[in-house]
């Protein structure tokens, strides 16, 4: 029987930027594998390269060298159109600042990925409702982001990330703008999502304690390099 | 993304910055309005000129003469002339034959003769012209004092204004009065020496006929088309024909020996066809029948060329405002990119392709163009109507009949809206491409 490729595999990935005459190596020769259904926390101080690595996995950026493979497909070799399709169908993203569109209601924000994926209009309402139910916000469906608390906004962002039923959930500092209790509830939700329906999660965070409690594995970065990579508990 | 979803998002985005987008749309509307107003004036003036000229009968008419006439008296004595194999006499038979030709709507002779008119016991010398019934629609009788002939066989006369002033400076008081036309009736003497086709000549008998003055008109339609100068006393053509008044060409006919026939012969006939486009073909057929034919078709072509250039220039001037409006669209959309940088990043992170972002900005530009086009066309039409209204108030004060100087035909409405949308899409090209090229990572970091 053929073995399934890992959910994510990074092979000697580097990403460098040129600023004037100096070259900044944001990610430097990182190799990492994330299995299906695994919850990986990427830890590190500011500027360690963890968000850049997450953007490479999300297909928002391309590596300067090396290969990023998601479910066996090399993102480096994809056209920008194929990368857009990958972001629509394979990954869901959650950001530190939620990034909900302020003029849209919760329903419209969550519906946005379905519009981009050209999902039939008749299906959309039910899928939006399911996603909001999953994060416990079905009663706030007609509210605008400004009418929600920080925790509720992040839950909405998670609902938006889940609505297209992705295989990988990428979260960039999802608790960074939340108090510790709300942050914990968000991570609890992510953990529940990891277990049911079963999803690979890569989360960037600098809160080691929370990461140790909720993630399966911790990968620590410093100066663009992978310093350590091991089980959380 | 599907077009409906793109449109939804575009409308939502436009509503978000409603003031700025409305002002930009208004800029497009003003540009389109200026274009529509200019072109509506061009089209209106062209229609006015064309309809006036069409009414005058100059451009749908062919002036027919017999070929023999055109040789002139220098052709030598009749006996020594070599007849043109195809040349024909322009008589009643020829007139009937021409009337039966396809697309011919009217055939009438030019009847003008110099004679004496007695009014209020005083004699006046003047030129009398027969007017066909169709001349009523020529436009020359619009705004006349009194009215046109009540019937083609009425003993009624219309005076040309200058001549009327000679009779009585208060021209309006002439209407309803009688005048006497004293003319020389031509009576054929018949053939001499048994030569039916020979030169019999005719006698001239003085006659009088009473006419009632029913109107006073500024100008005579198609005056001078036959080369006889303007008629100053106009009577119905059928009446003029029954008078059999001796005309200038009768003397010429005597010299040529063409005056013996009892059938009326004509020095010229005016042939009117259904439309100016049929003039050329009918003219050729008339020449084939053995007549000389002449039309003002070339002058009509020159008029069309003039108005095409005129419209083009008006269109260019009108487009200048629209060109300025396109800069407004570019500015608005570039501003929108700066403001919505983060939103573009989010859309890309959620899976929007570069093309989706590009199309979104395109649709926004197109919507502004569409609304600007619709509103601008309406505004342009209103400007045209206002100009017509102002012109008519001025003309009314000058005691002149009103005219429609602007016209917004359907093709202009459609073309203006399509042009506005097209120009707006072109203006959206650069901002849309710029938005599509945005790096999502940078865009997401933007505060």
Image (cartoon, rainbow, N blue to C red):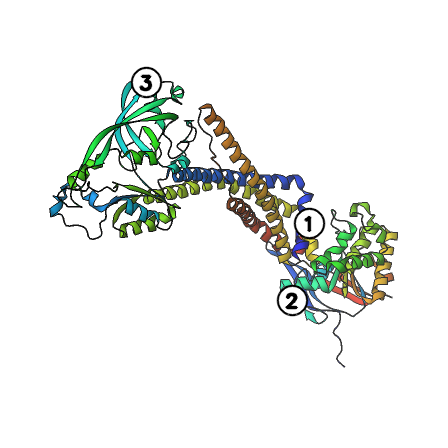
Residue B203 spot, x, y in % from top left: 19, 33
Q: Are marks 2 and 3 in contact (CB under 8 Å)?
A: no
Q: Is residue A35 left or right of residue B206?
A: right
The residue identified by callout 2 is A76
The residue identified by callout 3 is B120
Are dots 2 and 1 on a single chain? no
Element type where label 2 sits in the image = helix
Q: Residue at x 65, y 65 (%)?
A: A82
Chain containing the residue with disc 2: A
Q: Which mark is residue B291?
A: none
Q: Is residue A23 left or right of residue A205?
A: left
Are dots 2 and 3 on a single chain? no
| Residue B149 sits above or below residue A122 on the image | above
Residue B216 spot, x, y in % from top left: 38, 26
The residue identified by callout 1 is B446
Q: Are marks 1 and 3 in contact (CB under 8 Å)?
A: no
Outermost residue on the front side: it is B194
Label 1 vs label 3: CA separation?
99 Å
């Amino acid at each position: 029987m053929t073995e399934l490729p890992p959910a994510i595999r990074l092979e000697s990935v580097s990403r460098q930027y040129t600023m004037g005459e100096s070259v900044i190596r944001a990610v430097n020769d990182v190799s990492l594998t994330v299995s299906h259904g695994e919850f990986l926390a990427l830890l590190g101080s500011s500027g360690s390269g963890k968000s850049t690595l997450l953007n490479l996995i999300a297909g928002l950026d391309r590596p300067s060298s090396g290969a990023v493979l998601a479910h066996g497909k090399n993102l480096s070799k994809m056209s920008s159109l194929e990368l857009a399709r990958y972001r629509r169908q394979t990954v869901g993203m959650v950001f530190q600042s939620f990034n909900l569109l302020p003029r849209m209601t919760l329903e419209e924000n969550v519906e946005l990925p379905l519009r981009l994926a050209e999902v039939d209009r008749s299906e959309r309402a039910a899928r939006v409702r399911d996603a909001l139910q999953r994060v416990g916000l079905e009663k706030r469906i007609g509210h605008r982001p400004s009418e929600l608390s920080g925790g509720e906004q992040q839950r909405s962002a998670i609902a938006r990330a889940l609505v297209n039923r992705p295989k990988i959930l990428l979260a960039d500092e999802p608790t960074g703008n939340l108090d510790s209790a709300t942050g914990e509830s968000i991570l609890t939700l992510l953990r529940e999502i990891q277990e049911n329906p079963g999803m690979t999660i890569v989360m960037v965070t600098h809160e080691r304690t929370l990461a140790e409690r909720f993630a399966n594995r911790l990968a620590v970065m410093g100066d663009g390099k992978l310093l350590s990579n091991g089980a959380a508990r | 993304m599907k077009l409906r979803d793109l449109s939804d998002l575009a409308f939502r985005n436009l509503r978000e910055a409603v003031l700025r987008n409305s002002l930009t749309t208004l800029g497009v509307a003003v540009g389109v309005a200026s274009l529509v107003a200019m072109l509506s004036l061009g089209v209106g003036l062209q229609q006015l000129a064309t309809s006036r000229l069409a009414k005058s009968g100059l451009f749908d008419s062919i002036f027919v003469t017999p070929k023999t006439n055109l040789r002139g008296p220098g052709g030598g004595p009749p006996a020594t002339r070599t007849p043109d194999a195809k040349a024909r006499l322009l008589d009643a038979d020829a007139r009937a034959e021409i009337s039966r030709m396809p697309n011919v709507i009217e055939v009438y002779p030019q009847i003008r003769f110099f004679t004496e008119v007695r009014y209020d016991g005083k004699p006046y010398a003047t030129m009398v012209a027969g007017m066909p019934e169709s001349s009523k629609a020529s436009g020359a009788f619009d705004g006349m004092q009194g009215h046109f002939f009540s019937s083609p066989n009425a003993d009624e006369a219309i005076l040309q204004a200058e001549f009327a002033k000679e009779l009585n400076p208060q021209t309006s008081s002439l209407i309803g009065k009688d005048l006497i036309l004293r003319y020389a009736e031509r009576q054929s003497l018949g053939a001499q020496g048994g030569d039916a086709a020979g030169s019999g000549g005719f006698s001239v008998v003085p006659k009088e006929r009473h006419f009632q003055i029913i109107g006073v008109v500024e100008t005579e339609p198609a005056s001078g088309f036959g080369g006889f100068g303007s008629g100053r006393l106009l009577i119905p053509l059928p009446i003029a024909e029954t008078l059999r008044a001796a005309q200038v060409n009768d003397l010429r006919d005597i010299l040529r020996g063409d005056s013996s026939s009892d059938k009326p012969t004509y020095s010229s006939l005016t042939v009117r066809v259904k439309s100016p486009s049929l003039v050329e073909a009918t003219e050729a057929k008339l020449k084939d029948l053995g007549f000389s034919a002449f039309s003002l078709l070339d002058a009509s072509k020159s008029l069309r060329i003039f108005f095409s250039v005129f419209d083009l220039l008006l269109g260019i001037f009108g487009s200048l405002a629209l060109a300025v409006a396109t800069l407004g669209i570019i500015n608005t959309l570039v501003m929108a990119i700066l403001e919505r940088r983060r939103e573009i990043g989010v859309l890309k992170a959620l899976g929007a392709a570069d093309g989706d972002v590009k199309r979104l900005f395109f649709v926004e530009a197109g919507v502004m163009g569409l609304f600007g086009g619709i509103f601008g066309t309406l505004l342009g039409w209103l400007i045209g109507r206002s100009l017509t209204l102002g012109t008519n108030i001025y003309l009314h004060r000058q005691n002149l009949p009103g005219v429609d100087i602007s016209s917004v035909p359907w093709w202009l409405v459609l073309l203006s809206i399509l042009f506005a949308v097209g120009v707006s899409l072109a203006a959206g090209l650069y901002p849309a491409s710029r938005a599509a090229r945005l790096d999502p990572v940078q865009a997401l970091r933007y505060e």
